[in-house]
Every structure is written in structure tokens, then in C-alpha cells.
Image: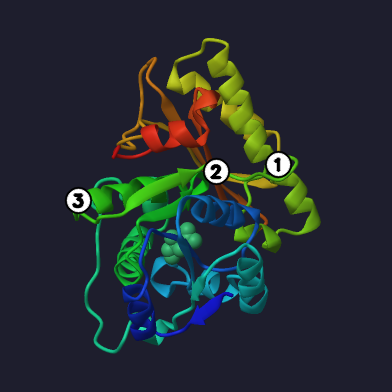
């Protein structure tokens, strides 16, 4: 039986009553197979599973993006119940940010570039809400998807720096048949824009193939991805970056160390992000947990 918990007090009370390991999957709802794969892993590896659904206003840097974010609460709770989640925590914004709220968590360096540059304040909102959700649910393990690679790096850094006693587990990106990374934002794409969005995966794959064929220069790999993206007139590139997957520092010289290629593209007014570790063989769970962000 899945139980819905709506208040922070009830969540803390319920957590205190739980013995044994607890896995948490944090979401903003509008669930898809990507979220369900995180739930599946949490189910396998813990005695209890908590999923959270909270569209966190502080991580959106445009009011429109927050307003237009898909909200499908009833369907989400139903999916989570069928996936075997024990508790669904659905707090309100007033519960999470009561009047005179004034505390924020800022992870300085890894939050600054890429998404942090394009969406100022985004990671401050993410780090703060994730800290609150970790405190409220006190999980043994928390599960996050590779799709939001920079978010993973930020959260792992924060957990390490603040000595949070939770293991952060990174699960591979779930993809549609054409390779598009599953995302709650995909439902906002019109049919032609959805078709065009397949170019993002083709760009990552083509660069990875070039890597596997021996190319190690980040400039050449980036140019390869940019050429593929340029073949799709509906795609407007925000960035294509080659970074060190632990620190997110840009890689500018040839190297045999693993690299993280990150892409952000606007298609039909929807901002889509994706990434891949190079070599491609590292995009699986054991390798992700080793290479993405601080280890341990
Ligand atoms: O990845 C997300 O859906 C959100 O950023 C998270 C981690 C649930 C925090 O609001």
C-alpha cells in the first residue's frame, strides 16, 4: 500500500518510525520511464522506498517555465504505487518555504558554469531543496539520473562537503527509440520539434564514435557534435562542452582521461540537455558512480 504524505511534520514522523534501509527518489512529477527506472533501482536495493514530488519554485529562473512545467499529480501517484513505492511525499511550497524563509545552500564552483551560467540561481534552488528533502527523508541512498549530469556533480559535492550520511546513486539516462533522453519537458515539444530533438543524441553518438576511433582532442570532438547539431535547422545550440567529469572544469587539450560531453539546445522554445561520458562504455551504472562528480 502506498501512502501519500503531504506535510513536512508527517514526513519526519513517518521517517522516525521506519527501521531498515530507505531509498529516496526525488522528482518534480510528470513522471516517465527515467524516473521509474530510479524507483526500480531503489526498490531493489532498499527495504523502504520514498518518492518525493515537488515542483520546486526556487530552481526555475523564469516564471513562465515554472508555470508551464507539466503537473500530473494523480497519474504520478498511481504510477509510483504500481512501481511499489511505500511513501509519496507531496509537500506544498508553503510547507517547504514558510514565511520569512531565509536559508539557502550554495555549492560554489561546480554550480557556476554550463547550466549555472545559462540559468542563474538554478543550482542554489536545487541544492537547497535537495538538502531539505534529504533532511526530511533521511535516506540510506538517494537516486539521481545521469541526464542531469551537472546536478549529480553538484549534489555529490554538497553531500560530501556537508557530511550528509546518504549514498548518492547515479543511474544511466533512459532514452526514447531515437535516443532522445527522457525528460518531463519532452511533452512540450510539437511533432516536428520532437522529431528534430533526435539530433541531440546523434551529435553525442557521432562524437563518441569519433572518440572510439581514436580522436582525443576536445576541440575536434566538440566540432563533430556541433556539425551534427547544425544539420538540424530547428535546433539552437546554447552550449556544447567537454569537461572533466569530476570537477566540470573545461578540457582544452588532448587527453586519454575520461571526458564528459554536455549539450544544451533550444528546440521550439523548449530547453533540452543531454550528456555522455567518453568513452561511451562508461555510460553505465558502475562507471557513472565512479566517474561523475566526487567519488565516495
Ligand atoms: O531533477 C529534478 O527533478 C529536480 O532538480 C530535483 C532533484 C527533484 C530537485 O527539485
Q: Check residue 198 in the rendering and tell me which mark sits there, or answer none.
A: 1
Residue farthest to the front, as pictured: 19
Q: Quadrant of the N terminus?
A: bottom right
Taking the spot 62% from the left edge, 60% from the top edge, the residue there is: 185
Name the residue that disc number 3 marks: 161
Q: Nearer the viewer, residue 47 or 110?
A: 47
Taking 36 as reference, is 53 left or right?
left
Q: Residue furthest right?
A: 191
Q: Could you tell me which residue is drawn at 25 percent across and 82 percent down? A: 101
- Local packing at callout 3 (Cα closer than 10 Å; few below 14, some 14-19, many 20+) is few
Q: Earlier in the sequence, mark 2 or mark 1?
A: 1
Cα distance between the residues tagged 3 and 1: 37 Å
In the picture of the structure, the residue carrying the numbered disc 2 is 274
Residue most extreme to the bottom: 99
- Residue 25: x and y in percent read 47, 60
Q: Residues within 10 Å of mark 2 (few under 14, many from 20)?
A: many
Residue 60 visible in image: yes
How far across and how far down the image is residue 292, in percent? 39, 37
Colour mapping used in the image: rainbow
State the count of labels.
3
Amino acid at each position: 500500500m502506498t501512502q501519500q504524505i503531504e506535510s513536512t511534520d508527517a514526513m519526519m514522523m513517518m521517517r522516525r518510525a521506519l527501521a531498515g534501509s530507505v531509498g529516496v527518489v526525488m522528482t518534480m512529477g510528470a513522471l516517465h520511464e527515467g524516473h521509474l527506472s530510479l524507483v526500480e533501482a531503489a526498490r531493489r536495493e532498499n527495504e523502504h522506498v520514498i518518492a518525493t514530488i515537488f515542483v520546486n519554485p526556487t530552481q526555475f529562473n523564469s516564471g513562465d517555465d515554472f508555470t508551464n512545467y507539466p503537473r500530473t499529480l494523480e497519474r504520478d501517484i498511481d504510477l509510483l504505487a504500481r512501481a511499489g513505492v511505500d511513501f509519496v511525499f507531496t509537500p506544498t511550497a508553503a510547507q517547504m518555504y514558510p514565511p520569512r524563509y531565509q536559508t539557502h545552500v550554495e555549492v560554489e564552483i561546480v554550480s557556476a558554469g554550463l547550466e549555472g551560467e545559462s540559468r542563474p540561481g538554478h543550482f542554489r534552488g536545487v541544492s537547497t531543496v535537495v538538502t531539505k528533502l534529504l533532511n526530511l527523508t533521511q535516506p540510506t541512498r538517494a537516486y539521481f539520473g545521469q541526464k542531469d549530469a551537472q546536478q549529480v556533480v553538484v549534489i555529490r559535492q554538497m553531500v560530501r562537503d556537508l557530511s550528509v550520511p546518504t549514498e548518492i546513486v547515479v543511474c544511466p539516462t533512459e532514452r526514447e527509440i531515437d535516443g532522445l533522453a527522457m525528460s518531463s519537458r519532452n511533452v512540450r515539444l510539437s511533432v516536428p520539434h520532437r522529431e528534430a530533438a533526435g539530433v541531440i543524441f546523434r551529435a553525442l553518438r557521432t562524437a563518441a564514435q569519433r572518440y572510439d576511433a581514436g580522436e582525443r582532442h576536445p576541440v575536434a570532438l566538440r566540432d563533430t557534435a556541433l556539425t551534427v547539431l547544425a544539420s538540424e535547422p530547428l535546433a539552437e545550440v546554447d552550449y556544447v562542452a567537454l569537461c572533466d567529469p569530476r570537477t566540470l572544469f573545461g578540457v582544452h587539450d588532448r587527453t586519454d582521461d575520461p571526458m564528459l560531453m554536455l549539450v544544451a539546445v533550444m528546440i521550439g522554445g523548449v530547453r533540452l540537455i543531454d550528456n555522455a561520458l567518453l568513452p561511451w562504455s562508461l555510460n553505465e551504472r558502475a562507471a557513472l558512480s565512479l566517474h561523475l562528480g566526487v567519488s565516495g
